[in-house]
Amino acid sequence: MAACGASGLCRPRPADAALVRFPADSLNNRYWLVRAGESYAESFGEPLTNPVWKTSERHGLSPLGKEQVLRGLTPDLEALGACTDGCWLWPSITQNAYQTAEVVAYTLGIGRSRIVPEYSFLDARGVGALENERLDFARRVVEEGDVLDAGWKPQKGTDGTPHESVNDVLVRMRQVLSITETQYFGDDILLIAPDSDCLSVLQAAVLGVDLRQHRRYAFRPGEVRPLQLSTVSFDTKPVSFSCPDPPKCTRRADV
């Protein structure tokens, strides 16, 4: 709405744009977190998290991935009541995520104009030097590191593959959620990511859960869940605490 003065001139109301804060007990839209169906790379046991491969056929939906979307994801969306009045699909441009969005849109009768490709924020988590390892080994190393510290990163590789911590992933997910919260109001929005970490980190942050435990909310390929909101509102007061032994207060938390 615009504010109009006595002269008849109208001044647009400033846009209410800000970064989403966590935990979050309310959002402008309903969100559905979707992990894309299995890719060929996943079926071959390859991490393939370097962004240069995002549009490669190796990231396309495998035969199993297509089944996961057609026989699992789409019926689950209908059962959950998603997109009953239309929705916006925000897939990563990584092939399995974008192809998942195309299949969902076609099956549910959603126009292609409702598919909004996301170019970086929904990328799979970069695993650095683990890019050249087997997928199951890379996942195990990352899982063990995440439990130690949300700032833990895989070792840096030599091929330019990002090596991201949980905190790094959260920065990206906060950005995409802030964009959709500014751009839409009262809509159903599907965030479609090629891997699980993007989604589980976002869910943990929204609930206010220790990010080291984000894998409690891990997603299987082709799985969809509504984004759960926190029952505790965001506390705007500065964080303060007493520390009788200051050196101990700066040490990494024990697991």
Image: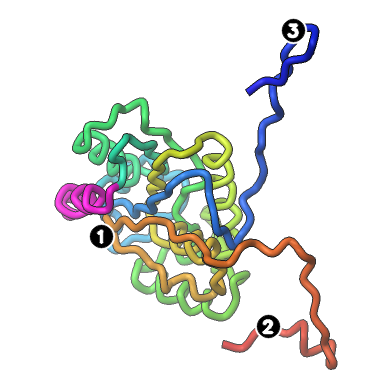
Left or right relative to 221: residue 13 = right
Left or right relative to 118: residue 5 = right
Q: Which residue is mark 2?
A: 252
Q: In the drawing, what numbered circle is on residue 8?
A: 3
Answer yes or no: is residue 53 visible: yes
Give the quarter of the image for residue 148: bottom right
Hey, what amino acid is under mark 2?
Arg
Compared with 60, 201 (above or below) is: below
Q: Which residue is mark 1?
A: 44
Q: Is residue 75 magenta?
A: yes
Q: Is residue 154 magenta?
A: no
Q: Earlier in the sequence, mark 1 or mark 2?
A: 1
Q: Residue furthest bottom?
A: 245
Q: Nearer the viewer, mark 1 or mark 2?
A: 2
Secondary structure under tag 3 reads: loop
User: What span is in magenta?
Assistant: 63-81
Secondary structure under tag 1 reads: loop
Secondary structure under tag 2 reads: loop
Q: Earlier in the sequence, mark 2 or mark 3?
A: 3
Compared with 85, 167 (above or below) is: below
Hey, what amino acid is under mark 1?
Phe
Residue 115, position as x, y percentages in the image: 37, 33
Q: Residues within 10 Å of mark 3 (few under 14, many from 20)?
A: few
Q: Circles 1 and 2: CB distance less than 8 Å?
A: no
